[in-house]
Amino acid sequence: MPSKQINVLRNYSIPKALLTLSLPATLSMFINSLYNIIDTIFIGQNVGSIGITGLSIAFPIQMIALGTGGMFGMGGASIISRRLGAKRQDDANKTLMNVVFYSFIIELIYVTVGLIFMEPILRLFGATETILPYAIDYMKYVFPGFFFFIFSVVMNNIVRAEGHAKTSMISMSLGAITNIILDYIFIVILQKGIEGAALATIIGQMVNATYLFIFYITGHSIFHFSLKFLHPSGKSLAEICAIGFSALIFQASTAITALLVNNILGRYNNAELYIAIYGIIIKITSFMSMPLVGIRQGAQPILGYAYGAKNYNRSKEVIKKAFLAMFFYSFIITALMLIFTATFVAMFANEPEFIRIGTPIVRIVVCLMIFSPFTVFGSSIFMSVGRAKESIIASLLKQAFVFIPACLILSLLFGAIGVWIAFPLSDFVSGCICALMILSFYKELDKSEETTNNSLN
């Protein structure tokens, strides 16, 4: 008899399986993005928009760490899902232990380099003399927290790959709720400002990571934390990184985008104000996109398992139903954001100039996010079925191939407004290209299904 988790991947109807796995992931992503927003609101309301600039500088560094965790976690999860679909339990367990080992090594490297070279790193990411003290106050706590942050990102992906979406939701929710409560205590009550936000963040990450560690060592998983399954090798590392590399590329390109935007905006008058506005744009667009990521995370193990079992009809249905849910959500959230833009901006910092300048900028940036499902789900589709090259291309499309060139060219032609125009332009162009890639793969699934049916007849 298959475990309950394998039964979800193998036998549940697609709508039921997506609801079972995507709803907890979506809720956890929603809570996760909500605490990031609340973090920024507490800073904006208690420190001012200048405090938000410190978070803006820190953001791309955190995205690189997130991408690294995603590379090991999503790469390992894809391999594990397909191993389970092919009924190779021990091989799946070996992948798990190798992923944990590799991620620990990279955590050690990140923390060491970050603490030693903190100031030059922050300057590289756009910190001016005014912003630098705020960025240092934040990152001197966040860098050591990467031990817990990267581990929790890795293990949340693995947990979902074996069908324990609720466990992932609980761990992320516990971390987020802890962060929100401590934000109020440290920032409002104890008046610790941006340092308080950093402390709340890393303690929340510790709670998240600890819950997942306890889950595995207490035998609730179908896998075992055992050194007998640890077989690190260049081949296993290359396989995990090749499949998960698109996750790193996606977040790294986001980080490079933030680095570029921060440095471009730093050249104009009102540089600190523009960087603060960009800081809330990061939070708002993340809030809008995270539920899409939750649906994607729920769909990935179902698609990986179905494809590994050569059930191409089920694979097609996963793609179709996941996209329908994503587009419905995208339409609603984009409309709401365009209608209530000024209200959202004022939540972060109730400063008249900040609201006056920030409101039209945010409207420009989010107006075409209805195309986001193609880029959000596109790379995950190819990652789930083990197509590293297509997954990397889909991940690079929006940020690296479209936004960065558009931002450089349009900012030279039109100044700061060119930076903001580059956002909807990249949503549209990358969304259309990614849609064509997905359509091509969908047709391949049709052909594979026909071949399978013919061989059976």
Image (cartoon, rainbow, N blue to C red):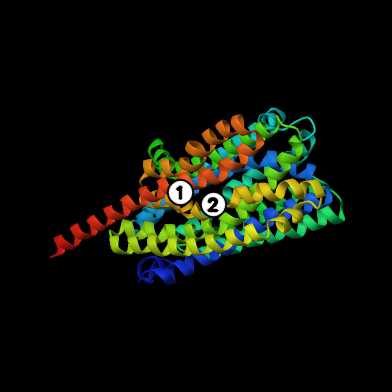
Residue at disc 1, secondary structure: helix
The C terminus, quarter of image: bottom left
Q: Position of residue 32 (x, y in %)?
A: 63, 57
Q: Residue at x 86, y 50 (%)?
A: 191
- The answer to whether residue 227 is visible is no
Q: Residue at x 59, y 56 (%)?
A: 288
Percent across and percent down for residue 1 are: 35, 71
Of residues 150 and 427, the one nearer the viewer is 427
Closest to the camera, between mark 2 and mark 1, is: 2
Residue placed under numbered mark 2 in the picture: 368
Q: Is residue 415 above or below residue 142?
A: above
Q: Is any part of residue 451 visible from this angle?
A: yes
Q: Residue furthest right?
A: 190
The reply to whether dot 2 and dot 1 touch (C-beta < 8 Å) is yes
| Amino acid type assigned to the residue bearing label 2 in the image | Leu
Label 1 sits on residue? 431
Q: Secondary structure under badge 2?
A: loop
Q: Of marks 2 and 1, which one's residue comes earlier in the chain?
A: 2
Marks 2 and 1, how far apart in space?
A: 10 Å
Q: Quadrant of residue 394?
A: top left
**Residue 19 placement (x, y as % from top left):** 48, 69
Image position, residue 55 (x, y; %): 71, 43
